[in-house]
Every structure is written in structure tokens, then in C-alpha cells.
Amino acid sequence: MKGRAKKWLRFRTTTLLVFFLVLFIALISRAYQLQVLSGKTLKVQADKQHTSTLQFQPERSLILDRNGEKLAASIMVDSVCANPSKIDNLEEVSSKLSSVLGIKRRSLLKKLSKSRNFCWVARKISPSQAESVKDIAIEGIFSIKEPKRFYPNRELAGQLLGFAGLDSRGLEGLELKYDSYLKGSPNKIFLGKDAKGGKIYSGDNPTAGKKSKNYNLILTIDSRIQYLVESQLNDAIKKTGAKGGVAVVMNPKTGEILAMANMPGFNPNTFFRYSPESWKNKVITDCFDPGSTFKPFLLAASLEENVIDENNRFYCENGSYAVGDRVIRDVKKYEDLSFREIIKYSSNIGAVKISEVLGKEKFYQYIQKFGFGSKTGIDLPGESSGILRQAEDWTKVDTATISFGQGISVTAIQLISAFSAIANHGVLMKPYVVRGLIDQNNRVVKEFTPTVIRKVISPATAEKLTSVLIDVVEGEGGTGRSAQIANVTIAGKSGTSQKFDFAEGSYSHDKVSVSFMGFFPAEDPCAVILVVLDEPANHRWGGVAAAPVFKNIAESILYWVEPSSLTTCATKTGRHDSGPTNLPASTSDVNTSDMADYSVKYVNLTSSDESTMPDFRGMSIRNALKLSQERGIDLKIVGSGWALKQDPLPGVPTESNKSCTVSFSTGY
């Protein structure tokens, strides 16, 4: 009996040990599974149950003009949030915040009542409102710093820059196109959750996330030229009673856009107060019939194909010419005209006669070569390709009307790019507005250089065509004489086109679009300017309404341009008076090692004579103050922006008067 008891005890002990060993192994296995195999997954699930995350965009990077002037920046502003669980009297708090923030009391009360632990009250409020909220000092009301996009020059280049929304995402223009480079990585704050899943906010500011990889944008735009162009365009719209207008300034040798203006403008700081139509960059989005500004491209094709020469005379039918079921008319009655006179006097009938000699197939080929009917590829969103029907669909009437710029629709960027090819010895360049990207340490991350698209016409043809365009401005009876500038040779062409009335299904007799485009100095161009006015109420001819705008812009630019840069900027791309030599087969062959040397440069024309009043016009406040201190002049500043006027004028002796009042402006 005693032996049997011992065996039973040993059995029970062994069984118990095995049981605990199995249990121990199971516990260790389960712990290993939870901690090691499923640890990350369970941690994520736990975080979701007990915390949530709010993301905040960091400050967007700067957008700078070619001279380093800020066109878009970010400032830190306050946003107000609330933890309603800590607020005793929701109605009273709603009433107080309503008067400070300008939000309806009922709307605020609804927000606070819906959420238990966290809700937004107001995003990106003004500094004065933020101070008022702090002064109230309500428990459960907190402030968080958020970046807000700021455009220091208000309307300047509004459609080009575009804007960013409440969440700091680019919505239009360059802000949209380069959003991924400008916005960087988001910052985060972590919100706890109570037992019921409500968000609990401690009031801490956002913690930094990953190191942000956002870059500053450097544009080809010169903000001073942009201001001049917008001012002159705005004045012209007021004088002519036009609905609006666009203007572009381009360097023909590089494709750099120096200014791109749309009127009426809008202030991207308050974009929500304007209609979406106001946000559009019509230079690249809107199509129009180019009118007589299209005639130079017809002539370029005819000269390049050698179907006409100086000996040809075209009978212009005394002002009336029947083509199919249409009658083409000229403003004046002409008989025999040379091709030079056809362009100079802008004869529609003469253009039709040239197109008949050239033929629609060849004409169509050159229209395509100049870039019409396809996008230019400019680095902006929303570009249109224009409207160009296939040549086989052209009737005889179509060929005739397209010869003087009706029945084809183009964008302003297409038109100035094509015209720049004539100024650039027949070489078409890709237009662009961004020169490069730099990081926060001012190191170049990416650089955009001039891109050759194709050779359209020979240098000899471009030279001959330029001489014809000079006649338009300089010659007796030319339609562009209002664009003349003393001591500067201008090559240009005016245009007037009827607008298509979609309601009537025909071209309107009342609504027109007028334009002028030209380049200077004609011998070695560094700038091409296009001006288009939409539906002017008076002065309804391009040579009368648009040519003076071109002149005013060009004169203003020339006043601030270093004279030598106008004659030497061509050498950097291997172009000389005889035209391009060794035309690059690809963009990599273009010499772009020194961007600054072939860009339009600006200097102040201040006399070095310290006994006379210097010229402050065109300077920033900082530069004006620096110069005044160097000369010992008491400077009185009025306004902000760039210097427009000064009293006394430059050159006045300063012996008896060492003070000067300078008026600055960034508006119109």
C-alpha cells in the first residue's frame, strides 16, 4: 500500500509539472506573438483607439523674381480651436467669440455643441483678432500657429502667381504648377481620446515632422517690368473703354518671360472675393483671332518658299475682292502693291493674293512650324492649344480669311513666341517663367535653361521680314507709326480682328480685339512686347489703341535698361548679325553657362555728380535710402514699393537744397 501511494504521488507531481510547463510555454509563445510578431500592428490599432493626428502644412517656400524680390511668402498667423468639455457656458462663449471673430453666434454655438473635446473655431485670423481672443482668456479656447500665404505686392502678377488655399495647397498659377516643390512635408500634433472616443487637445503647438524638402522658386519675371506693363495696360483699358487686356514681354533669344500681365487683375491675398474668371491667366488660356498680326507669318512662309520677291506687284482690286461667296474689303482702296506695302498698309486683299500664290498646304505647314495649333509647353497650368483646322478642310474662303488672321484662333503666348522667332533670326524658343529652384541654403537644386524648339525660317528671310516690319512703324503711312520711339528702331505689326458672335453664328461688326506686337532694337532685339485689348469702346484699331501702349512700355523699359545689354545679349547663344551659326540640334548644345549675361539688365541712371540731385526713380526704398545717405540727402518717403516720382527732379543742383521727397507705389 505504501508503494502504491508513492507511485500515485509521483504521478500527480509529474502531471502538475507538465501542466505548468505547458502553460508556461503557452504564455511565453503568446507574449512573443503579441510583443514581437504582432507588435507593430497592435500599436497602430492602439494609437487609433487612443490618439488621433492633425496635420499642419509648414510654411510654403518663397517665390522670387529674377532680382530676388519677394512675390509670394508665408507668414505665421493664429488659428483658434476649442475643447468644449472645458467650457462651462457655451452660449456665453459663443457670444463673446462671435463679436471678436465676426462669425455668427448660432454658427459658433453649433460647432461647439457638436464636438465634445476638440473643434476648429476659426482658421488663420488677423493679428488684431488673435489679440482679442487672448484678452478674453476663455478656458477651453486655444490658439495654434499656422502659415498663411501672403502676396506683398497685392495684384502684381496675380494670375501668373495664382494662390494657395486654406490648407496651403496651390490652387492656381505657379502655386499650383510647382506645388510639390513649394509646400514641403506636413507638421503634426497628436490628440488624445477619451473613453468615448472624443478628441482631447492639450493646447500644444504642432511638433515638427520630417525635415521639409521645399524649395524657393526663382522666376524669369522682373517685377519692375511687370509693374510697368500692368500700369500701362490698366491705363489703356480706362482710356479705350476696353473690357480687359493682356500684355507680355519676352526675351526672344532665350524664351524668358520678363512680364505677363492680365487686366482686370485680382488680389491673391483675397482670391475668394473674386470670380473664378478673374483668376484665369488669359495669356495662356484664352484664344482669339489674331487679325493682321498674323500677316507677317504668311509673308515669312512666302519669302522662305521663294514664291514672291521684291519685283512682284499684287493688284488689290481698289478695296473690294470677291472670294467664293464672300467679299474681302480693305479700309482704303489700293491698286498695285508690293509685299512690303501690303504689310505696311495692312491690306487684307494683298494678303489674300499672297496666300493664293503660296497655296494652302505650304501655308498650313508654316503655321504649324511657328507653333500655332499646339501648346508652347510653357511651365504654367491650363495652356490652350488654340484652334487650327486641318488644311484639307479649308475652303477657298478659309484660306483667304486665315491669311489676314480670321478663321484661326491663337493664344497670346503662341503669338509672341512665334513673333519672337522672327526677332531671333528664325529660331523658335520655348517660353518659360521659372529660372530655377534653390533650397533653404540658397543652393541651386534645379535650373531651367533656354530650349530651342526648331528653326522655322532662315536668317536671311528673318532679316528681310524685319526690314518690312520696320517699315510698318517707321515708314510713311505705316499702321504702326504710333509705336515710334526716338533714336530706337522698332519692328512691329498692328492687328484688328472682329470677334466671333456665337449667339449670331457669325463675326460681330461691333466687337473687336485690337493688338500690337513689336521688338526692339530691331538690329539686335532683346525684348518683344505684345499688347492685346479686348473690345475697346473707342479707338478700335490696333495701330491707334494698342501701339501707344507698346510705345509706353518700351520707353519705360529702355529708361532702366543698360544700353550695352541691348546690343550684346545675343552673343551668349552664338547668334550674330548674320544669324545663328551652328544651330544646336538639341537644347544641350545651347550655351547657357551664364544666364545673367544675356538677360535684360537694369541700372539706375543716376548722375555721378554729387552736386546735383540723383535720380531715385525706379529704386526700392532700401536702395533709395542707401543712395541718399551716401549723398547726404534728407530723403522723405511717401508710400511703398518702387519710386515713381521725386521732387526736386534729377539733375537739380543740391547746394541750396539737400532734401528730396520721393513717392513710392506698388499699385495703380
Image (spheres, rainbow, N blue to C red):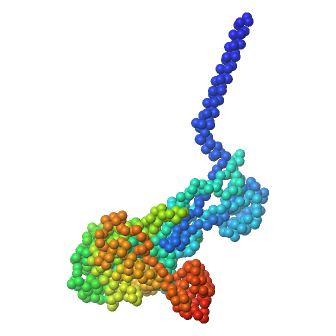
Residue closest to the eye, 131 or 582: 582
Single out the residue that lies furthest toward the right.
88
219 on left or right of 374: right
Single out the residue that lies furthest toward the bottom.
656
Residue closest to the eye, 441 or 436: 441
Picture quadrant where residue 561 is located: bottom left
Q: Residue at x 65, y 52 (%)?
A: 190
**x, y percentage for residue 295?**
32, 79
Picture quadrant where residue 81 is located: bottom right
Q: Residue at x 22, y 77 (%)?
A: 307
Residue closest to the eye, 527 or 371: 527
487 on left or right of 185: left
117 on left or right of 397: right
**x, y percentage for residue 642?**
55, 80
When the figure is inspected, residue 238 is found, relative to residue 203, above or below; the finding is below
**x, y percentage for residue 474?**
35, 88
Residue 346, visible in the rendered structure: no
**x, y percentage for residue 422?**
33, 76
